[in-house]
Image: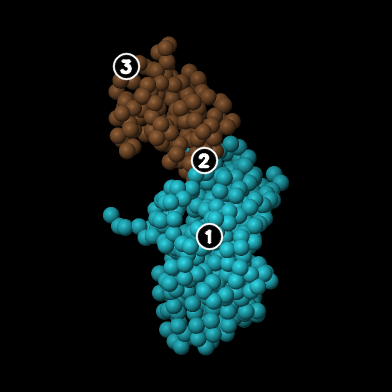
Amino acid sequence: MNIPAELKYTESHEWVRVEADGTVTVGITEFAQDALGDIVFVELPQVGKSFDAGTDCAVVESVKAASDIYAPIAGEVIAVNEAVTDAPDQINHNAYDAWLFKLKPANVSDVDGLLSADAYGKNIG
Amino acid sequence: MTTLKQTPLNAAHRAMGAKMVDFGGWDMPVNYGSQIDEHHQVRNDCGMFDVCHMRVVDAKGDGVRAFLRYLLANNADKLATPGRALYSAMLCPEGGVIDDLIIYFMSEQWFRIVVNAGTADKDIAWMKQQAAQHAPQLSITSRDDLAMVAVQGPNARAKVWQVLPQTRKATEGLINFQAADCGEYFVARTGYTGEDGFEVMLPKEKVETFWYELNKAGVKPIGLGARDTLRLEAGMNLYGQDMDESISPLEAGMAWTVDLNSERDFIGKAALLANPPTRKLVGLVLLDRGVLRGHQKVVTAQGEGEITSGSFSPTLEKSIALARVPSGVQVGDTVQVAIRDKMLAAQVVKYPFARNGKGLLNV
């Protein structure tokens, strides 16, 4: 299972990438897309909305099930990936390219509290 | 932790890369990769399903037809030619559905019944109890020695003949809903996909070889995920979702299988006559973006209803559902479905949504 070392992870299977400008990009992991199966619908948050860490802010639905996506850390949504709403199966094909939304963190240091690739790998192992 | 039950094909599923899930206590394949690809495979070519968890029951003896005439809501007298099959509900005295099943008329001494996996023990206990009262001379036997594989799709029959050439002569002339007893192989032109094909019952110890031979002939394995979207597109009920013991067959889209006109008495008939339906099962197509799912609330001009089965239709590339709504709702109406915090628009449509490789919808 592909778990890129440079990303951070949550127990609820989101991946998080800290960008050079201090914003974070969020998607779902290879493990999550594999467990869901063929993804057919994605509902993304509104740009400008703020979320607390751990609150549900998006939905990914496969043929068989709907799965809530949680904000990994507190922050404001500054962008969403419209391309995955039009072609949700991109997440199945490359979970780490098909990001869902970008957050401006309330505190960028909150990212330090997330799981490392190693820790996430052990979690799903 | 209880151990999951396994079919004789368990090792084969794992060898073929299946993702296994707990399906009502059975360790079953949900897919072998992409559920959508498997769905299209069946609509466009053919695929095979492990349905060994379903139960074959043989009812044998003098007067078996008369017994089934009383036991079931559909009329066993419709079966005049040996081999012919009939879909029926088995009702409780209160008029709810104990199970939906298929009966095959093989002779006046032998009817074969195929029931759902999750209800099999309950069904057989009920049949035996009724037989003890009304037809004690009959034997009701659970055929735990048999396995069952469904091969479905436009090329399914040809593939079965390739693997079992000895059954071809007896099964070439079968019409839809007819079966032939070919010794070790019982071959029925039935299924749960809306496609042509066979359901083959055979001795358990032969099923793994049969499965691999079909695969060698180019038949791909199909998981329960695609089985569900295929049956939903075909407008076929799933027991436990679209109906159960608390639901009248008349409110579950099964009125066509219930014979209320003849003089014949059957278990549940009095309750059905005393309680005319106030709801009905309809098809829905979601007009907005999203996915319809079981238990979502449906709001109509005539009152509220509920989705019983919903999913994404790979054939139509839209979300579809079966929903139980007030009887006054009509095809063409627009209704609202509560999905999380939104009310989304859906259109009431005639179903099936797809059959024989083609979508049947004009929205």
Foreground: B77 or B198?
B198
Dot 3 and dot 2 within a common chain: yes
Q: Which residue in the structure is indicated by mark 3?
A: A109
Q: Which residue in the structure is indicated by mark 1?
A: B213
Residue at image coords 66%, 57%: B154
Q: Residue furthest top?
A: A21
Residue B53 is drawn in which quadrant?
bottom left
The chain displayed brown equals A
Question: Which class describes the residues within 10 Å of circle 1: few (<14), some (14-19), or many (20+)?
Answer: some
Is residue B121 rendered to the left or right of residue A89?
Answer: left
Q: Are marks 3 and 1 in contact (CB under 8 Å)?
A: no
Whole-angstrom CA distance, mark 3 to mark 1, is: 59 Å
Residue A33 is drawn in which quadrant?
top left
The spot of residue B66 in percent (x, y) is 55, 84
In this picture, is B203 found above or below B342?
below
Is residue A39 rendered to the left or right of residue B25?
Answer: right
> Closer to the N terminus: mark 3 or mark 2?
2
Residue at image coords 40%, 74%: B125
The spot of residue B296 in percent (x, y) is 50, 46
The spot of residue B130 in percent (x, y) is 45, 80
The chain displayed cyan equals B
Q: Chain of mark 2?
A: A
Q: Which residue in the structure is indicated by mark 2?
A: A38
Residue type at numbered disc 3: Ser
Let me know if residue B273 appears in the view. no
Q: Chain of mark 3?
A: A
